[in-house]
Amino acid sequence: MQDNDLLASSAMYLHGKVNLELALLMILPGQDQTLRDMLGAHRPGHGLAGAFYTDPDIYALDVAAIFERQWIFAGATCEIPKPGSFITLTIGRSPVIVLRDRGGEVRAFFNTCRHRGFKICDAAKGHTPALICPYHRWTYRLDGTLANAKHMPADFDPAAYSLVPVHTRVVGGTIYICLADEPPDFAPYQDAMVRQLAPHKLETAKVAFEADLVEYGNWKMVMENSRECYHCATGHGELMRTFLDIYDFANPQDSQPIQDYWNKWDAAGYESRISEGPNYRAARLPLTGSSKSITMDGKPAVKRPLGDAPPDAYGSLRWVHYPSTFNHCINDYTVLVRMLPVGPEETLVTTKFLVDAEAVEGVDYDLDTLTKVWTVTNDQDKALVERNQIGVRSSGYRPGPYSPSLEAGIIKFIDWYRTKLGEYLERAH
Ligand code: FES
Ligand code: FE
């Protein structure tokens, strides 16, 4: 391949005009190298080329290189409180079941039967003593081993047909899973979040409300939108009644309210400072004015606190972990957001509201007060993402510059994404 061809191909990508399949036909052999060159041609501090948000082949690459290799947020331990409790989710092309086994351990398996591959469990959540494939009724124990398969020959060895396990980690009441044979190092994030989540006691929570939202935008578009509050002033009037000003968020060292807030958590013996790694960031920040919670009027939504916040320390622990989750722990509730890719231009965003397990709906909280701000905000973000997706799909889209201060979170995410994609292509080469 000539340099000029490569440059032309990369330029077409960068202008979001090209179909990847066509481009690969143009550049074979050496497609990996060209994709690497495309990543290398990315202009630092700028948006990705349009194809990264729309192209089916790059989407398939994202699933293989990112979602099938990284740790993915699955849910909360309180969603599977007893042996036999389970939740299901689909990561790219792979249905997964997460359950609590008879010994109380959290486990995960590919939700695919070892007989002929049927998707075993179709429910989003539930409780079962065993996993029974509805097709021919192969029956698996909660540890994934095959207990029963009728009409198989005498030399059939059930021990050879356990469900395929998925790596699992529990972090302060949250569950992460990884589909890769050899998962990446989770310890730095796990250690940081065990400390950060300690006062919030998510293990003692329950899910008060859960909502799925399909956003017709690429998963990276959804993540990018979540990584900046540049749009908050115009896009999120309800959230900004209580949410701290974006400038303080970007520059905590310059903010006296933040310093005062951190000192209260320090005095209580809890982690108060920012935890950060290449694929995560957790920051504990106060709310505005006299707000005590992220609600329409700033008053707590739940009478019983969730966790152990110090007196008069009203704020939120906000944290993100690429590629699948961003969250807020407030003193009276926690909101967990999971985003999973469905297609090149479709992402499933699931929001779960956790309150203290003893809190009673109608007595200690009402759902409208609890969920209003986030329901409105999520709808606003869906509209923003979908309109952004329409613009980026255009042949006239040219990647623009991010604000180095207010969109630093996006720059970090895009750098991480490009690095992970590059590493995958390097290995595949
Ligand atoms: Fe599951 Fe046949 S495919 S029992
Ligand atoms: Fe938003």
Image (tube, grey):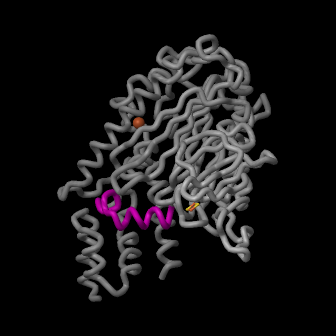
Of residues 228 and 417, the one nearer the viewer is: 417
Q: Is residue 305 left or right of residue 235?
A: right
- Prevalent SS, magenta region: helix
The residue depicted at 70 percent of the width and 60 percent of the height is 148
User: Quarter-wise, where is residue 336 in the image?
Assistant: top right
Q: Is residue 206 visible?
A: yes
Q: From the viewer's perspective, is residue 155 above or below residue 397?
A: below
Instruction: State yes or no: residue 370 in magenta.
Output: no
Outermost residue toward the right? Answer: 103
Q: Position of residue 113 (x, y in %)?
A: 59, 61
Q: Is residue 47 visible?
A: no
Instruction: Inspect the magenta stretch and tell me whether residue 62 lies in it.
Output: yes
Residue 187 spot, x, y in % from top left: 71, 57
Res 237 quadrant in image:
top left
Q: Residue at x 22, y 55 (%)?
A: 397
Q: Residue at x 33, y 30 (%)?
A: 234
Instruction: Give residue 244's position: percent from left, percent from top.
Output: 51, 28
In terms of image quarters, where does ligand 1 lie?
bottom right
Task: Read off the magenta span.
Answer: 50-66
Q: Is residue 2 left or right of residue 61?
A: left
Query: In the picture shown, does residue 266 fall above or below 72?
Result: above
